[in-house]
C-alpha cells in the first residue's frame, strides 16, 4: 500500500508520457494519411480538370486573335486567359505533387545542396533585393543519404516562404548547418534516439512570424494565408522529409520571425 502511494507521482508522470506519445503518433499518422489521400485525389482531379481547361485556353487564344472585338470584351478575354494560366499552374503543381517520381538516394553534401538551392531561389524570386542571405555552414558536416532533387525542393520551398514573408519589409534569411548528437529521447524526435548522430539544417527568417494556431496548420495540404498560394509547399516538404527519415521542427512567434530546423540521420562513414 505504501509503495503504491510513493509510486503515484512516478506513475502519473509515466502515464502522461505515454499519453502524449500516443497523441503525437496519432497526429503523425493522421498527417501521413492526409498526404496519401491527397496524392490520390489530386492526381484524379488534376487530370479531370486538364481536359476542359485545355479547351478553354484554346478557345481564348482564338478569341484573343479575333479582330474588331470591343475594348471591354478584349479585356475580359485577357483576364480569362490570365486566370486560366493560373489554374494551369496549380494543376501542374498538383500533378507534380502526386507523381511518383523516380527517387535516387545517394550520399550528399548538405552544404552544397543548400548552395544549389540558394541559386535556384535567386533564379525564382524576382525581388530578393531587400532580403539578406546569411550563410553559416559547418564545414565538417558529414554526408546525408538523400535524393538531391527532392532536397532542393525542400530547401527551396522553405526559403521561398521565408522570402515571401519578408517581401514587404525586408530582413534576413539565415541558413545554418550543424552536426549534433541527440542528447535525450524526445517525444517530438520519433526518428531518433539518444546518442544518434544527426546532420542539421536551420533556415530562419526575420519576417512577421506566425501565431500558434497558424503554426499547427502549416503542413496541412492546401493551408495557405496567401492570395495566390497553393498551400502545397510545406506538405511536399513534410512528405519528402518523411521518406528521408528526417525530423522537422518549427519555431515561430508573431513579431519574432520563423525558424525551421531539419535533422537528418547522419550517413555512416565508410
Ligand atoms: N517563413 C514563414 N513565415 C511566415 N509564415 C509562413 C512561413 N512559412 C510558411 N508560412 C505559412 O504557412 C503557409 C503554408 O505554406 P506553404 O505550404 O508553403 O503554402 P503557400 O506558400 O502556397 O501558402 C503560408 O501560407 C504561411 O501562412
Ligand atoms: Mg510556399
Image (spheres, helix red, strand yellow):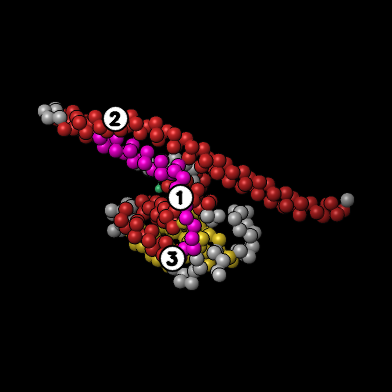
Please name which of the two marks, 2 or 3, marks the residue nearer to the observer.
2
Residue 111, disc: 3
Where on the picture, by quarter, is residue 47? top left
Is 83 covered by the magenta stretch? yes
Mark 1–mark 3 distance (CA, rounded to whole Å)? 23 Å
The reply to whether discs 2 and 3 touch (Cβ–Cβ < 8 Å) is no
Instruction: Name the residue carrying label 1.
Output: 102
Residue 11, disc: none
Which is nearer the N-term, disc 1 or disc 3?
Answer: 1
Where is residue 15 drawn, in percent x and y?
72, 49
Where on the picture, by quarter, is residue 196? bottom right
Mark 1 closeness class: few <14, some 14–19, many ≥20 residues within 10 Å: few
Mark 3 closeness class: few <14, some 14–19, many ≥20 residues within 10 Å: many
Disc 2 secondary structure class: helix
Viewer-nearest residue: 121 or 16: 121
Mark 2–mark 3 distance (CA, rounded to whole Å)? 45 Å
Where on the picture, by quarter, is residue 98? top left
Disc 1 secondary structure class: loop
Which is nearer the N-term, disc 2 or disc 1?
Answer: 2
- In the displayed orientation, state which residue is furthest to the bottom: 140
Residue stretch rendered in magenta on the structure: 81-109
Disc 3 secondary structure class: helix
- Residue at 38 percent across and 58 percent down: it is 117
Instruction: Name the residue carrying label 2.
Output: 55
The reply to whether discs 2 and 1 touch (Cβ–Cβ < 8 Å) is no
Is 270 covered by the magenta stretch? no
Amino acid at each position: 500500500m505504501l509503495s503504491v502511494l510513493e509510486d503515484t507521482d512516478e506513475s502519473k508522470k509515466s502515464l502522461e508520457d505515454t499519453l502524449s506519445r500516443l497523441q503525437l503518433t496519432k497526429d503523425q499518422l493522421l498527417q501521413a494519411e492526409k498526404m496519401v489521400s491527397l496524392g490520390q485525389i489530386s492526381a484524379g482531379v488534376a487530370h479531370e480538370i486538364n481536359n476542359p481547361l485545355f479547351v478553354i485556353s484554346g478557345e481564348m487564344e482564338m478569341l484573343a486573335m479575333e479582330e474588331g472585338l470591343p475594348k471591354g470584351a478584349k479585356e475580359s478575354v485577357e483576364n480569362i486567359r490570365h486566370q486560366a494560366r493560373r489554374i494551369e499552374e496549380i494543376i501542374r503543381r498538383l500533378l507534380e505533387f502526386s507523381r511518383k517520381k523516380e527517387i535516387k538516394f545517394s550520399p550528399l553534401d548538405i552544404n552544397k545542396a543548400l548552395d544549389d538551392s540558394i541559386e535556384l531561389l535567386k533564379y525564382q524570386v524576382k525581388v530578393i533585393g531587400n532580403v539578406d542571405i546569411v550563410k553559416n555552414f559547418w564545414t565538417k558536416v558529414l554526408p546525408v543519404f538523400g535524393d538531391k532533387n527532392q532536397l532542393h525542393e525542400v530547401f527551396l520551398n522553405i526559403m521561398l516562404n521565408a522570402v515571401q514573408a519578408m517581401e514587404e519589409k525586408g530582413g534576413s534569411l539565415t541558413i545554418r548547418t550543424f552536426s549534433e548528437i541527440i542528447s535525450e529521447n524526445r517525444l517530438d524526435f520519433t526518428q531518433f534516439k539518444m546518442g544518434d548522430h544527426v546532420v542539421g539544417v536551420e533556415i530562419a527568417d526575420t519576417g512577421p512570424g506566425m501565431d500558434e494556431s497558424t503554426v499547427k496548420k502549416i503542413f496541412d495540404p492546401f493551408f495557405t494565408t496567401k492570395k495566390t498560394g497553393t498551400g502545397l509547399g510545406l506538405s511536399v516538404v513534410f512528405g519528402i522529409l518523411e521518406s528521408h527519415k528526417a525530423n522537422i521542427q518549427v519555431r515561430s512567434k508573431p513579431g519574432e520571425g520563423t525558424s525551421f530546423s531539419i535533422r537528418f540521420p547522419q550517413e555512416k562513414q565508410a
